Amino acid sequence: MKLSRIGLVLGLMLGVILVVQAADAPKDPIVMKDAPNGAVTFDHGKHVKAGAKCEDCHHASKPEKAATKEQQACRDCHTKPPAAGMKTARQAAFHNPMAKTGTCVSCHIKQAAAGKTAPTKCADCHKKA
């Protein structure tokens, strides 16, 4: 009798953990529709397979805009235009206006230089509807 209760409690705890993790898991794919050059579809799974780590993009929060969860969406802090006290607008969080440096494009250029498949041209990521 005691063993079945322990099993039930452990099962319920595991269920709660799985539900909480699923709630925090990124939704794939994410489609960012407000880019002037066209929507960008971002697939977390594809980036993880390519070797990206969560902290490569989801950096520590700044005092000007404290994070409300561990893996916060870019657009929560990097708004268009930048929120008061913030220096980095949404586009600049991904790449500079000429798409030569920045979180996304710098990594793509580095991957391509290493012989890996990574989009490096604007139209490779930005798709007009």
Image: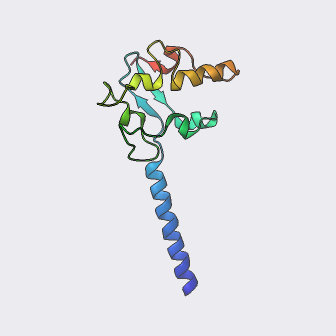
**In the image, what residue occupies the spot 57% across and 20% down?**
119
Quadrant of the image occupied by residue 37? top left
Residue 101 location (% of width, % of height): 53, 18
Residue at far left of view = 84
Residue 58 location (% of width, % of height): 49, 38
**In the image, what residue occupies the spot 61% across and 22% down?**
118
Given residues 13 and 78, the one toward you in this image is 78
The quarter of the picture where the C terminus appears is: top left
The quarter of the picture where the N terminus appears is: bottom right
Residue 127 location (% of width, % of height): 44, 19
Residue 34 location (% of width, % of height): 35, 24
In this figure, what is the number of numbered marks?
Answer: 0
Q: Report whether 99 appears left or right of 67.
A: right
Q: Report whether 77 appears left or right of 54.
A: left
Residue at far right of view = 115
Q: Report whether 32 appears left or right of 47.
A: left
Above or below: residue 87 compared with residue 73: above
Given residues 79 and 83, the one toward you in this image is 83
Above or below: residue 73 compared with residue 18: above
Q: What colour scheme was applied to this rendering of the protein?
A: rainbow
Residue at far top of view = 98
